[in-house]
Image (cartoon, grey):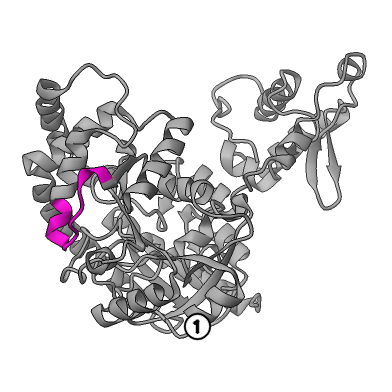
């Protein structure tokens, strides 16, 4: 669905339906919405423009009468070329066929709608996996900018692996977690997601299978699937990923590597036990199965630190370790890192240079100064305190509103609570009805394809008041769906 930032002017003497009709007509006639593209649903347009459905119906009827759009069974409403101005000119390229032919798969529809809705300030975001703006260190950041400006060289490109000053600081920091690595085995990336993209195109063959926990954050992406690879989920328990079938899956499903989030898992919040970490590393070493350890939540512990990373016990170089500042400091800084064998890092660095010629020099200098100044650890203490308060409020609200209709875990850190409804519901209905009431949720089916009873609840973004209000509203929607008999 096209992203819409424009809003009708309710103070204008021109009727709202006419404003909307002219807006869509202009989008079509200037080629922004090409022939064959799908028009957003009436419900979505009404929510976007904050008008009644009848207003949208009138606007679309006017466009249909002009031959600009047409409702098609099973496809919704699409842009057509039945107007005289279009018919009398050369036909434009069939951009929709180009869009559909692209190698990179589109996001899940849930994800696309979440990405659009997250920027509506009127919506309560109960699934967002980032720190609230009120928790971001704005004053500290100003101080860091001043310190960085004194050290910073002219902002030219950095070397392929990234700013040496930053890589040295990361190397020093990782020593605290038992990881001994030189700066030459560290690559700076634009967030951990870019690391996964580089790995997918730089290290793996088409047709490979990625083993992972189920549920998993990785299911919400199409990084590996777009590179003609498959995902194969393994069950988890309270200690983390179950290891019994790793060897079988590696051999029978052409497993190329295993992806895991052992510390404050996304979306369940589980922390892999030290014993399970040792067992996992042992079996992967035996099977010669590389591991991607995604450790972006490590610094966000609340009750106690999680065990040392898998990478700290890795003596054979089978673990690629991912870290990031996006979850703990600033999502907009876009700084992460990959740690691994030097030949692998050099391969990934070469691909990164072909992709973007290096992460932002400014961001790298700022990130390095956060570490070098000691302000990063000071900031983390504050964040942990705030997350503890937010978790308490969230758990209290869950006890009030969900105790008879769901169960949930109590995370020891990170952002997420994995909420399991007692009854299965149509996730699309729950998502849509919640959004209509101004609450944005992350359905469990994003992270577990067959799930129809789970939600990922985040306590990191919404205000304390909105957490309470949002959870109450979701509980009411769930009860309505169950009482209506609209369960799966």
Mark 1 — residue?
245
Residue closest to the eye, 320 or 52: 320
Mark 1 nearby-residue class (10 Å; few <14, some 14–19, many ≥20): few
Residue closest to the eye, 124 or 349: 349
**Residue 479 visible:** no
Left or right, residue 177 beside residue 21: left
Task: Tell me which corner region of the image, top left, top right, bottom left or bottom right, holds residue 352.
Answer: top left
Q: Is the residue 107 above or below the residue 253 in the image?
A: above
Q: Is the residue 436 above or below the residue 231 in the image?
A: above
Q: Which residues are magenta?
A: 173-184
Magenta includes 461?
Answer: no
**Residue 188 visible:** yes
Magenta includes 176?
Answer: yes
Task: Tell me which corner region of the image, top left, top right, bottom left or bottom right, holds residue 399.
Answer: bottom left
Q: Quadrant of the N terminus?
A: top right
Residue 448 at x, y percent in the picture: 53, 69
Left or right, residue 479 beside residue 311: right
Left or right, residue 244 beside residue 35: left
Residue closest to the eye, 205 or 361: 205
Residue 101 at x, y percent in the picture: 74, 41
Residue 5 at x, y percent in the picture: 54, 31
Residue 365 at x, y percent in the picture: 20, 31
Q: Quadrant of the C terminus?
A: bottom right
Left or right, residue 419 beside residue 209: left
Task: Tell me which corner region of the image, top left, top right, bottom left or bottom right, holds residue 207.
Answer: bottom right
Count of picture labels = 1
**What's the residue at 41%, 47% (across, down)?**
195
Badge 1 element: loop
**What's the residue at 81%, 21% (across, down)?**
92
**What's the residue at 60%, 58% (across, down)?**
229
Q: Is the residue 27 above or below the residue 189 in the image?
A: above
């Amino acid at each position: 669905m096209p992203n819409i930032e424009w809003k009708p002017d309710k103070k204008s003497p021109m009727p709202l339906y006419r404003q909307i009709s002219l807006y869509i007509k202009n989008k079509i006639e200037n080629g922004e919405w090409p022939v064959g593209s799908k028009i957003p649903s009436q419900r979505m347009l009404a929510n976007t423009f904050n008008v009644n459905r009848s207003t949208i119906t009138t606007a679309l009827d006017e466009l249909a009468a002009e031959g600009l759009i047409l409702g098609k069974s099973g496809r919704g409403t699409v842009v057509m070329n039945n107007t005289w101005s279009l018919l009398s000119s050369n036909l434009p390229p069939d951009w929709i066929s180009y869009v559909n032919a692209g190698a990179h798969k589109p996001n899940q529809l849930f994800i696309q709608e979440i990405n659009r809705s997250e920027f509506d300030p009127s919506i309560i975001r109960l699934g967002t996996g980032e720190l609230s703006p009120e928790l971001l260190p704005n004053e500290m950041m100003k101080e860091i900018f001043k310190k960085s400006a004194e050290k910073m060289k002219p902002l030219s490109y950095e070397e392929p692996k990234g700013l040496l000053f930053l890589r040295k600081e990361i190397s020093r920091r990782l020593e605290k977690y038992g990881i001994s690595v030189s700066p030459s085995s560290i690559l700076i990336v634009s967030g951990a997601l870019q690391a996964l993209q580089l790995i997918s195109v730089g290290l793996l063959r088409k047709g490979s299978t990625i083993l992972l926990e189920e549920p998993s954050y990785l299911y919400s992406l199409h990084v590996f699937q777009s590179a003609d690879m498959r995902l194969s989920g393994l069950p988890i328990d309270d200690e983390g990923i179950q290891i019994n079938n790793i060897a079988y899956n590696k051999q029978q499903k052409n497993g190329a590597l295993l992806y895991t989030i052992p510390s404050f898992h996304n979306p369940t919040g589980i922390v892999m036990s030290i014993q399970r970490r040792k067992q996992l590393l042992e079996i992967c070493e035996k099977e010669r199965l590389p591991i991607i350890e995604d450790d972006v939540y490590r610094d966000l512990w609340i009750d106690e630190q999680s065990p040392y990373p898998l990478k700290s016990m890795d003596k054979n170089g089978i673990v690629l370790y991912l870290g990031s500042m996006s979850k703990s400091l600033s999502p907009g800084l876009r700084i992460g890192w990959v740690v691994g064998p030097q030949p692998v890092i050099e391969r990934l660095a070469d691909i990164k240079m072909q992709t973007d010629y290096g992460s932002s020099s400014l961001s790298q200098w700022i990130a390095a100064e956060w570490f070098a100044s000691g302000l990063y650890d000071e900031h983390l203490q504050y964040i942990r305190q705030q997350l503890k308060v937010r978790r308490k409020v969230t758990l209290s609200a869950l006890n009030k509103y969900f105790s008879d209709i769901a169960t949930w875990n109590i995370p020891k850190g990170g952002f997420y609570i994995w909420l399991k409804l007692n009854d299965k519901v149509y996730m699309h209905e729950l998502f849509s009805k919640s959004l209509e009431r101004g609450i944005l949720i992350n359905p469990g089916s994003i992270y577990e394809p067959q799930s129809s009873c789970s939600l990922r609840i985040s306590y990191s973004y919404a205000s304390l008041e909105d957490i309470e209000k949002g959870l109450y509203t979701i509980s009411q929607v769930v009860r309505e769906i169950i009482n209506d008999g609209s369960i799966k």
